[in-house]
Image (cartoon, rainbow, N blue to C red):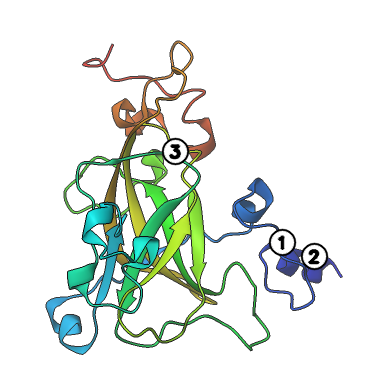
Amino acid sequence: HGSEAVLNQFGWARHQTSPEPNTPEYFATLRRDYKLRELTDHDRILYEIDIRIEPCHVMIKTGGRGSACCTDTSVAACQDLEGGIYAGEDLQLAYFQNAHIPTCENTPFQGDPNCGTFLEIHRACPYVKNVRYQPECDNVTVLSDVRLSREFVNGYRTTFVGTAELCTGQYEVWWVVRTRSGPYVQFRKALHVLGPSCPPLPEGRPPLEFLDRNECPDLDARYIDCKAPEEYT
């Protein structure tokens, strides 16, 4: 039973009831060992992935279809908001893939939070050449997500993801396929949040972008023991 308990913690037990999505208990079950498998030019000959922000934002351009303007349509009917959003309960995203979207439906892992295709919101880290993931920036933590439930789509489809917990700053929307061998990132889309601002950090705790990675070896300690570099102080 001890081994079974460990398996349950990470969501691979068939009989386990999954936590409510977008709760601390849910996020605690998600794997963080991401593998970057973004599309190359060769891949794009075979299949394409796209994500668009607020595709029905300007109502006059929706042709009277409102929030359904980008459902089962081509890219011509789907807007892509530039300039940023204000965080709220619902952010409409349009997504497209002209290939099978793994959902884990009708399998022993149906409903498992570590199985299927998801759109995830992550922090965007400052660019560092030749570095894909920056643990000290914590861009592997899922801040919000939504499961994609349709295996085949005829054009673009839309869904909504919560952003109420996001603060002003730079983020990314990741297209992630969660598998038994870990989550694979296939596409990333920039997302800028204009507001609202979060309360200021306590004295001595610099913003993420100013953390000195040499002073922050422990993810969980980045706001406790980390020091700002000299140019910040």
Distance between the alpha carbons at the discs numbered 3 and 2: 33 Å
Rendered image: mark on residue 5: 2
Horizontal side of residue 89 vs 1, given as left or right: left
Name the outermost residue toward the front. Answer: 64
Q: Percent position (x, y) of residue 173?
A: 35, 56
Badge 3 or badge 1: first in the primary sequence = 1
Residue 96 drawn above or below residue 59: below
For marks 2 and 1, give the CA distance. 6 Å
Quadrant in which the C terminus is drawn: top left
Q: Amino acid at mark 1?
A: Gln
Q: Of marks 3 and 2, which one's residue comes earlier in the chain?
A: 2
The residue at the far left in this view is: 41
Instruction: Point out residue 53 in the picture as x, y percentages from the top left corner.
Output: 30, 55
Q: Between residues 72 and 207, which one lies in front from this camera angle?
A: 72
The CA distance from mark 3 to mark 1 is: 26 Å
Residue placed most toward the observer, 133 or 191: 191
**162 lies left or right of 65:** right
Give SS at disc 3.
loop
Disc 3 residue type (three-letter):
Leu
Q: Secondary structure at mark 2?
A: helix
Would you say residue 140 is visible in this rendering? Answer: no
- Where, by quadrant of the figure, is residue 94 drawn? bottom left
Q: Is residue 12 left or right of residue 187?
A: right
Residue topped by disc 3? 166
Measured from the top left, where is residue 160 in percent x and y? Answer: 46, 58
